[in-house]
Image (cartoon, rainbow, N blue to C red):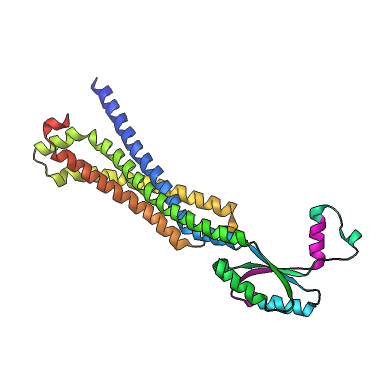
């Protein structure tokens, strides 16, 4: 009979430990994902901005030397991320591939123009900045027109501001939920030992002495949950880096290390505080209140 009861108690204890580790792991993993997203959100936004192209068309009078000289100027321009020269012949071929027939056969000549596709640096993909770049380029008498999607530029910048605001709100909300979940799991774990706590107190043990083993156990469980969360986060980082190498998500190793250390520190801190206050609550209760 005693053996069966001991086994039951042991299974309940293991189940309690497992639930604490699982809740810590899940919460810290989600917070870690959010932290990694926040530090890479600007990089993602910049990457999207730099995919917006500004196309500069040249007059037919512009010869090869003029086109080449303009390309050299773009390479050293502070606003230029990358440039691609598209000759009128290459543009005609692209149009032919798109419409499925050679329009030159019935036009008799190529009406398209030589052009440069300019991908601006993210800082210049703003309404005012991109307008200044356009104004500067139009001073070149050989340029016939400059085309880019103004509405897309405005929409991207507006949406980035909105997303940034919501990220801050969601971060605060998830952090609050994380504290509540971990605190609830640990309080349930301490609650099952409330009679042991009160018995130790009745035989003369100090509050610090009673709290210490519970706090140490919870901190160890918190460290285990945090370690599992860190391993899962490293797995996610490796997957994203392999699937989307252009993002360069592993380039900023310092900030990634800060997020991972913050996950570990948060796991230790919240388990320590939750256990401290949970044990303190039962230590301050009267014996009759334990029931």
Q: Is residue 147 above or below residue 271?
A: below
Side of 201 where 105 appears, left or right:
right
In this view, the residue in front, 168 or 279, is 168
Looking at the image, which residue is at 26% across and 24% down? 5
Instruction: Check the image and name the residue furthest to the top.
Output: 1
Q: Is residue 153 above or below residue 211?
A: below
Looking at the image, which residue is at 14% across and 36% down? 198
Looking at the image, which residue is at 60% across and 70% down? 131
Residue 103: x and y in percent read 86, 58
Q: Quadrant of the N terminus?
A: top left
Side of 286 where 54 appears, left or right:
right
Looking at the image, which residue is at 27% across and 43% down? 217
Residue 249 visible within the image = no
Q: How many marks?
A: 0
Side of 103 where 47 appears, left or right:
left
Residue 50: x and y in percent read 60, 63
Q: Is residue 75 magenta?
A: yes
Q: Is residue 275 magenta?
A: no
Residue 193 visible within the image = yes
Residue 49: x and y in percent read 58, 62
In this view, the residue in front, 290 or 75, is 75
Residue 127 falls in image quadrant: bottom right
Q: Quadrant of the C terminus?
A: top left
Q: Is residue 203 above or below residue 224?
A: above
Q: Which residues are magenta?
A: 74-96
């Amino acid at each position: 009979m005693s053996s069966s009861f001991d086994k039951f108690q042991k299974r309940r204890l293991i189940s309690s430990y497992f639930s604490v580790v699982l809740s810590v792991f899940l919460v810290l993993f989600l917070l870690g994902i959010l932290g990694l997203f926040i530090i890479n959100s600007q990089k993602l936004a910049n990457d999207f901005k730099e995919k917006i192209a500004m196309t500069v068309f040249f007059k037919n009078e512009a010869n090869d030397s003029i086109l080449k000289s303009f390309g050299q100027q773009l390479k050293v321009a502070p606003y230029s991320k990358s440039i691609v020269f598209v000759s009128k012949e290459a543009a005609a071929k692209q149009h032919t591939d798109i419409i499925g027939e050679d329009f030159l056969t019935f036009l008799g000549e190529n009406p398209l123009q030589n052009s440069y596709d300019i991908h601006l640096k993210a800082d210049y993909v703003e309404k005012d900045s991109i307008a200044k770049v356009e104004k500067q380029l139009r001073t070149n008498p050989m340029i016939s027109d400059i085309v880019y999607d103004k509405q897309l530029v405005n929409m991207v910048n507006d949406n980035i501001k909105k997303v940034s605001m919501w990220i801050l709100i969601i971060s605060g909300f998830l952090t609050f939920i994380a504290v509540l979940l971990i605190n609830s799991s640990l309080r349930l774990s301490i609650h099952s030992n409330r009679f042991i706590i009160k018995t130790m107190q009745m035989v003369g043990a100090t509050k610090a002495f009673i709290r210490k083993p519970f706090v140490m156990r919870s901190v160890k469980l918190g460290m285990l949950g945090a370690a599992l969360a860190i391993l899962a986060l490293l797995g996610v980082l490796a997957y994203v880096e392999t699937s989307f190498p252009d993002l360069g998500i592993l380039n900023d190793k310092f900030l990634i290390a800060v997020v991972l250390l913050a996950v570990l520190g948060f796991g230790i801190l919240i388990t320590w505080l939750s256990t401290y206050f949970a044990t303190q609550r039962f230590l301050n209760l009267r014996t009759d209140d334990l029931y």
